Image (tube, helix red, strand yellow):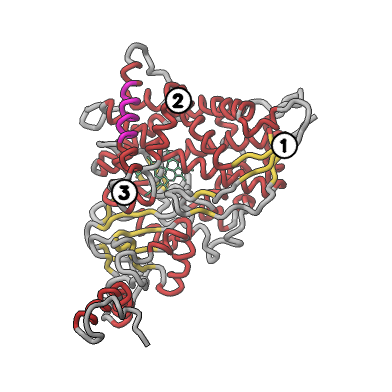
Amino acid sequence: MLSTFEGFIPGDRYSPLYILTIVVINLPIITILLHGLWQVVSPKDPNVPPVVFHWIPIFGSAAQYGHDPINFFFKCREKYGDVFTFILFGRKMTVALGPKGNHFVTGGKLSEVSAEEAYTHLTTPVFGKDVVYDVPNHILMEQKRFVKFGLSVENFRAYVGLIEDEVETYLNNDPSFTVYGLGDINEWGSFNALKCMQELTIFTASRTLQGKEVRASLDKSFADLYNDLDGGFTPLNFLFPNLPLESYRKRDRAQKAMSDFYVQIQENRKDEDHSHDHDMLAALASQKYKDGTPLTERQIAHIMIALLMAGQHTSSATASWALLHLADRPDIADALYEEQVKHFSTPDGKLRAMTYEELKDLPLLDSVIRETLRVHPPIHSIIRKVIKDVPVPGSLANPGPDLTYIVPKGHYILSCPALSQADPAVWRDANKWDPLRWSDPEGVAAQAFKTYDDATGEKVDYGFGAVSKGTESPYQPFGAGRHRCIGEQFAYVQLGVVLSTIVRRLEMKLDTPIPSPDFHTMITLPKKPCNIRYRRRNFD
Ligand code: HEM
């Protein structure tokens, strides 16, 4: 029989050239087999966490992690325990699972682990220079303090009505809600939850935090700039900071244009007194570093971009998931509506506007947001780069008597709050979206929340005001420790007003099952299509 290669490989069948050609052609397969074999037979260093078996060198477990990180980690945990390393395009990612794993990563020492080194290649080309992960940690802590100054109760009070107004205007005017707008019939219409929540999130964030100039520009050039910049905030950018691709060039052009746009707003504002405005630009303009230096206009511009990017996908994804679940559970949506009626109905049978203080005192609304963040935390992986060999505490992973795992310098460590928040060992019916689990004061949820956000418990000030430590909680949607999110309260205000205003107006239902999560984006979004059917509530 003729060999497949006979006829086009020069020389004798057993000639060196023939054999070399066969080897070269089969090199990838040979490499893969040898790589697999080496992982099985090579001697293991008992002090180093086990490496997840993978076939392709360098590529490692990228496909499994990128496709469904939670499932991948659950499977790895069965095989390797709570601490293991997987390969992600040549990077060594040491995963630490469970509440102790969360603590190991979010409570890591500054001398041992660094968020800047893990994220700056992704964030600096998008946010711009001299802010967030482009500065030493102590400067970031000061910048977080400046932003917290802008996220004041006084500002939140002003935001509630503005957000409500944006939602009302959107429902009255957006083409997705034309059925809603038809005067005398009440037919079921349909809207795309993700698209609408993305629009409402940017409308409401710009009307409040970002300031009126940004809100006014949204229908024009700003939207294109935002989209180009957003195109530079993807898993591809995380893996490869600079590629000769159009999306990277668009990212860089948009960053510059958006930075100039925010600087120009500050220039224009100089003609009038804006110190009493309730937006972040006004707040940042008054802030000074500890050494007395004020923020430059450029730094303010870049902080504004960072806040825009940090809040947009996280809040819009959460709002979308919450609406999808409410549409799937009309009983909970109705109970949410009744909560609104109980607190805000007026003698003429209408619902009045809510205040910030009242918003904070709506237990079911609060539970709906908490539960949505438990089941669908927008950020599934929290990553730090190891800058000095770091020992894994024995209580987290004990490889044997008198042994400790050491995660070597150069590795990354990763915790996965999405896993600890969905762990059947911690939560009853872990995969079920059940807001009522939060109303049992003795239940697991309440206990987990206590360790995360305990008003009376341990507080730490990392330089941006005292926050609950929360590093060892199984519930950590906003991260914990020194890198804990500063947008948490704003997100609750924004989500609370958006969801309650929609529930006041609309009845919703789903014709399809809840979409599954799409992990191919930086933030976990619902897979398309994610349409919700709706009609006007209390139509008469
Ligand atoms: C950090 C989640 C909204 C600003 C974080 C982290 C998480 C998170 C998990 C920690 C990342 C880490 O430790 O590596 C969320 C969720 C949100 C939300 C779930 C909404 C539902 C916002 C908003 C803003 C914001 C609205 C701004 C107004 C920030 C900033 C950081 C951060 C500046 C970086 C802090 C640091 O590294 O020190 N967020 N976030 N976030 N968040 Fe949020």
Outermost left residue? 16
Identify which amino acid the numbered label 2 is placed on. Lys
Residue beneath the point at 42% across and 37% down: 227
Element on which disc 2 rests: loop
Element on which disc 3 rests: helix
Q: Nearer the viewer, residue 378 or 460?
A: 378
Please tell me whether mark 2 or mark 3 is closer to you in this view: 2
Which badge, 2 or 3, is on the more N-terminal residue? 3
Q: Which stretch did the figure color magenta?
A: 253-264
Ligand 1 under 8 Å from disc 3 Cβ: yes
List the residue tagged with mark 2.
220
List the residue tagged with mark 3.
119
Residue 260 shown in magenta: yes
Residue 473 shown in magenta: no
Q: Quadrant of ligand 1?
A: top left
Q: CA distance from mark 2 to mark 3?
A: 31 Å
Which badge, 1 or 2, is on the more N-terminal residue? 2
Residue 206 at what x, y percent from top left? 46, 28
Residue 340 at what x, y percent from top left? 67, 35
Prevailing SS of the magenta stretch: helix
Residue beneath the point at 27% across and 80% down: 42
Q: Nearer the viewer, residue 510 or 147?
A: 510
Q: CA distance from mark 1 to mark 3?
A: 43 Å
Please tell me whether mark 1 or mark 3 is closer to you in this view: 1
Q: CA distance from mark 1 to mark 2?
A: 31 Å
Height in image: 335 above or below 50? above
Residue 513 at what x, y percent from top left? 65, 54
Residue 535 is marked as 1
Height in image: 401 above or below 487? below
Identify which amino acid the numbered label 1 is placed on. Arg
Which badge, 1 or 3, is on the more N-terminal residue? 3
Height in image: 140 above or below 355? below
